[in-house]
Image (spheres, coloured by chain):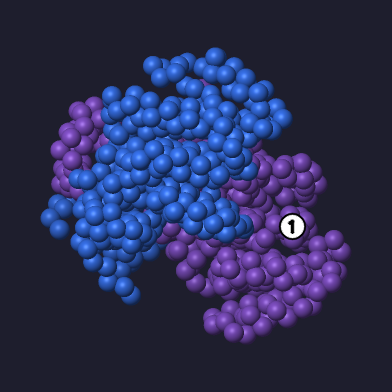
Chain colours: A blue, B purple
Amino acid sequence: MLLLNTDRIVSGVLAGEKQSIARAISVVEDPRLSPESRQIIKGIYNHTGKAHVLGITGPPGIGKSTMIGMLSKMLSQKGHSVAVLAVDASSPFTGGSLLGNRIRMQESLSKFGVYMRSLANRGLSGGLSRSVWDSVMVLDAAGFDFIIIETVGAGQADLDVVYLADTIVVVLAPGLGDQIQAIKSGIMEIADIYIVNKMDREGSYIALKDIEEFLAYSVQGEWKVPVIGTNSLTGEGYEEYISRIISHRDFTGKDSRTRLRRYRYELKLALEDEMKQKIDSEIRRLVNENAIEDMMSSRTDPYTAAESILEDLLSSDSAD
Amino acid sequence: MLLLNTDRIVSGVLAGEKQSIARAISVVEDPRLSPESRQIIKGIYNHTGKAHVLGITGPPGIGKSTMIGMLSKMLSQKGHSVAVLAVDASSPFTGGSLLGNRIRMQESLSKFGVYMRSLANRGLSGGLSRSVWDSVMVLDAAGFDFIIIETVGAGQADLDVVYLADTIVVVLAPGLGDQIQAIKSGIMEIADIYIVNKMDREGSYIALKDIEEFLAYSVQGEWKVPVIGTNSLTGEGYEEYISRIISHRDFTGKDSRTRLRRYRYELKLALEDEMKQKIDSEIRRLVNENAIEDMMSSRTDPYTAAESILEDLLSSDSAD
């Protein structure tokens, strides 16, 4: 059992120390929200809100990791500090097969001062989101200019994560299958920037046209969503890619809607977590008093029982 | 928009009418718990508690569906009424590839009076469990003697589901890979009966011995966990399989621990759901009053904000 000095971790994070950042993320990424996790967030919260968060999503196998490598390298060469959070959407059967790749990338990126961290998706949809956003707060408080979140964009959990980013980049590659998958999964509607990666491949211009056509039929806001072709091996398209990211950062700087949405979401998760803890202790109390046996033997259905328990809980004084 | 007559559905379920059962399950399987869903559960609850619930789990590709087909056919030939709930743990990318198989099986089993139903796993771990157990209550109230739940036993969501069954059957097949997978996923520890299926395959006796060895090193309770080899095409081993299920039913009939555990779990889910609804309406209220903007601009971190909101919520009178 390790005793954590959260004050020490907080001051280390604020000073930008790598070891404290790593330790803080290890604490807050645990899906079971711990008291230490709350202490860290409370300690750093006043120092967040400066980083620009990029959510990069797209189906597996289209070169997202290589793209994020190139992107973060170029951003850091332009004088921005960059952190990357990779979110594994690994199934229980395949778990962590890309670890080798991640380690290689990590080594090559650290030469450019890019901080890279892989978060384990432990199969808890709400928990994942909270892990990611609390980790983003740590990196934000540590002073990074850009925080890049990488997800595979499959399923609601990933959508929840990427939805709260300041700039959402959807990456596709030549080949109709991916595009259809992306449209079905709902990520097409939320993109601020589209990238067609692997522009050297056959069908890349068709893919670009497909997306432009899709956008032509969509309702557009004040921000004109760009579609950019890139080649992550040669760097083709990256100057435009980066300039669009910067202009979207300036654009979103004007209003605080994303930050408000994120705050509301974090508040909701925090409330749900508090409630869960109250419920757990209430159920433990009922177990101790054999009250659950009584409900069961009087054949009270769980929903009616829950209603009356909650009524008691809400009308009682919360003096503790 | 369809208006549901839940009283009509409840009385139909209690009369064992197939159409009402199907409709009731469609209502309660929705991961977003509806008022109709509560009404149905409240209406049927007093008629539950008679069925014996079998949870059958094991890795994909070992013939679980064929086994369940043979098992339910033989149980119904012995005079027991049987319902099967198949829980798809399909990923968002593969969704429902076995539908054709399911339909064929359904047709052949309905000749024996076996009721079969496939539940969609919509990627909500807590939601899945509640869907399954509320569906089990419907089938229980409809008067089935045995309710068989089929899961692939991968990940926490499946474990949650199967954990609450009266009798837990873990199915394995020759070949070490599966066994290791099963041990890693935690399903080995919770089995009441082990089946090695596909006994005609090479390595089947080694698989039997492996499991017996595993059990020799495990702490055993009053129930001696049997390991049975079966062949689902010839019916080999099924007489013993069924007699062990019946004796485990008699064994568990003696104490009500499983049912108490299930009640506690359902109560917890119902409480969490009630709480979530309260939180949602509270957050809507805060949004309307711009209270969230105020918290954000005064830089109150979400956890501190949640604590004070909850304190207000709990100390206020719940007169509504």
Residue that numbered label 1 is attached to: B61
In the image, residue B120 lies at what x, y percent?
60, 43
Q: Residues within 10 Å of mark 1 (few under 14, many from 20)?
A: few
**Disc 1: host chain:** B
The image quadrant of residue A58 is: top right
In the image, residue A81 lies at what x, y percent?
35, 44
Toward the left, the furthest residue is A319
- Asked if residue B54 is positioned above or below residue B114 in the image, the reply reads below
Toward the bottom, the furthest residue is B216
Q: Quadrant of the C terminus of chain B?
A: top left
Q: Give the residue at x 38% y 29%.
A: A246
Horizontal relation, residue A84 to residue A14: left or right = right
Horizontal relation, residue A306 to residue B168: left or right = left
In the image, residue B2 lies at what x, y percent?
53, 24
Residue B303 seen in render: no
Q: Give the residue at x 28% y 24%.
A: A254
- Asked which secondary structure carries label 1, the reply is loop
Q: Give the residue at x 54% y 45%.
A: A65
Q: Nearer the viewer, residue B251 or B93?
A: B93
- Asked if residue A27 is positioned above or below residue A130 in the image, the reply reads below
Q: Nearer the viewer, residue A111 or B143?
A: A111
The amino acid type found where label 1 is placed reads Gly
Horizontal relation, residue A168 to residue B246: left or right = left
Q: Give the residue at x 21% y 32%.
A: B293
Q: Nearer the viewer, residue B25 or B227?
A: B227
In the image, residue A155 lies at what x, y percent?
54, 41
Residue B100 seen in render: yes
